[in-house]
Image (cartoon, helix red, strand yellow):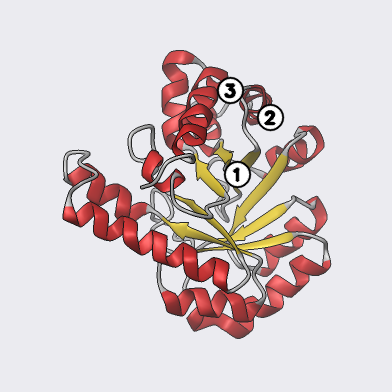
Amino acid sequence: MIELGVNIDHVATLRQARRTWEPDPAWAAVEAQLGGADGITVHLREDRRHINDEDVRRLRELTQIKLNLEMAATDEMVAIACRIRPEMAMLVPEGRQEITTEGGLDVAAREAELRARIARLADAGIVTSVFIDADPAQIGAAARIGARVCEIHTGPYAHAFHAAGRDIGSPAVRAELDKVRAAGEAVRAAGMRFNAGHALNYYNARPVAALAGVRELHIGHAIVSRAVFVGLRAAVAEMKRLLREAAGGAA
């Protein structure tokens, strides 16, 4: 059954706009869980622009569902993950000037370095994941370094969907969705878990949720944006229902 991981980074973004103590990401995690989230995702960036170390510590202490820590593949972040012990650590590319993650991690170009960091995380009992583009070379590299999960980058599909006026029948949209589908098949054939995420929202997530074998979608900005109007618990419940309905169909 498909699962929903809710990224609460932008709850912290709102807090940091005033450099105050609210809204509290830990309370957001509680609300997300009550709305039906299967996991909580946060990205502890090197510049700590939103989520900070204390947030991660409190989330590990208070979260009763799976905690997924997104992070750069650095010694500092691996050490933090090994200390905090999230259920999953996902290695992502990170640029200081980017607004959000742009493109997948180039695993193929960094195999030796990443293999050592994946092994260290695995030795700490943490499920290891990599955020990669829908590229066979990256999937093969992910398998070789020992990743247990591949999260396929859905940004190109989401952008094509928006550019085509939300027309799932558009050839450009179908082409991008087919890339995600083929990547998912390759991930599963290599013995890894197929997750997906990035730029998914209440309009474009259904076709991805309907793909065969997709285990988990990670969605953040769209849910936090909807929560401004309906509350986080309701926004999560709406997305969870949408995904479960879609997972019974075909894209």
Frontmost residue, 145 versus 102: 145
Residue under pointer 3:
23
Give SS at disc 2.
Answer: helix
Residue 42, numbered label: 1
Quarter of the figure that contains the N terminus? top right
Q: Is residue 132 visible?
A: no
Counting residues from the start of the chain, the first of labels 2 and 1 encountered is 2
Frontmost residue, 184 versus 75: 184
Residues packed near mark 1 inside 10 Å, few (<14), some (14 to 19) or many (20 plus): many
Measuring from the top left, give residue 173's x and y in whole percent: 24, 52
Residue at left 58%, top 23%? 23
Residue under pointer 2:
26
Residues packed near mark 2 inside 10 Å, few (<14), some (14 to 19) or many (20 plus): many
Residues packed near mark 3 inside 10 Å, few (<14), some (14 to 19) or many (20 plus): some
Task: Measure how far apart labels 3 and 1 are at the Cα level.
Answer: 15 Å
The image quarter in which residue 56 lies: top right
The image quarter in which residue 54 lies: top right
